[in-house]
Amino acid sequence: MKLIIANWKKYLSAEAEAAALAEGYVQLAVPSGVQAVACPRFEHLAAVKEKLGDVVVGAQDIMLEGEFSPEALKGLGVHYAILGHSDSRAAGDTDTIIRSKVIKTLEAGLKVILCVGEPAKIHAEGEEAIEQFVLGELESSLPVDDLDAEVADGSWTKDLYVVYEPVWAISKAGVGESDTPEDAARIITLIKEFLASRFSMPSSPVLYGASVTALNAAAFLSRPEIDGTLVGHASLDAEEFQKILDAAG
């Protein structure tokens, strides 16, 4: 199954805007073998959830406690939570905070979409530096020994999705430097090999997420190593998002 995640980020400030976009999503034809997930802002979750049909709702992040804790989000009908996104890391989320969020989210029974990826400075240092950085972020975010007994038996692995999100390649509206499907597939293969050896996860889905648009989605999704995409700005147009879904089908 290909997982295509629409991360609406903070682009839509008003609930009415989010509800209008959700109405466009209701018309989406999700191909067989594809799961579509829409992730609006916290405050728009309820309004969006009411309107969506075959599109599942996810959260852009979690709060460790309070109104948007994993338990509360599950009560709102949320199935997925994006953790470790570059926006969250830029806002102050450390590996320690992300690890705590991963634990809480898994324990609540939500599926984790964990983002890892190198900034421009690390990318410029070459392949070895990139690999060390990405795998370091990944290992720091998956604290198996800290999980409660109910998920410490390894069953949590079925609820984990990893997104390779090279921060240097992210740009608004697809403007800026771009990654290549070949390089993305190489890092994603490395992530899968690491998960298989370190956490006994031979078939963990790994997605790609940096400036994916209708124009380049097919090139990335045609790679067998890539199990889906995390879509940012392009997900704000239902017709463009439909083209990305079609590329995954």
Image (spheres, rainbow, N blue to C red):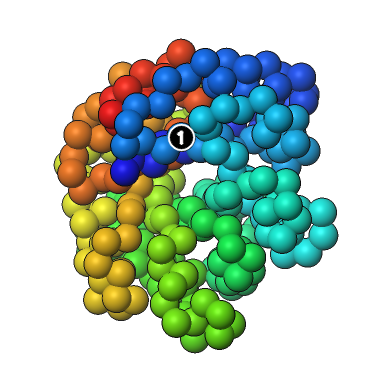
The residue depicted at 26 percent of the width and 53 percent of the height is 188
Residue 235 placed where, x, y %?
50, 25
Between 20 and 11, the one nearer to me in the picture: 20
Residue 57 placed where, x, y %?
59, 39
Q: Can you identify the residue that label 1 sits on? A: 36
Between 96 and 197, the one nearer to me in the picture: 197
The residue depicted at 51 percent of the width and 57 percent of the height is 112
Is 8 displayed left or right of 196 in the figure? right
Q: Secondary structure at mark 1?
A: strand
Residue 124 placed where, x, y %?
30, 51
Q: Which of the image's four quarters has the C terminus? A: top left
Query: 181 above or below 120?
Result: above
Give the residue type at disc 1: Ala
Q: Quadrant of residue 39?
A: top right
Query: 115 above or below 141?
Result: above
Judge the density around disc 1: few (<14), some (14-19), many (≥20) Cα neighbours within 10 Å.
many
The residue depicted at 51 percent of the width and 37 percent of the height is 37
Q: Quadrant of residue 211?
A: top left
Q: Which of the image's four quarters has the N terminus? A: top left
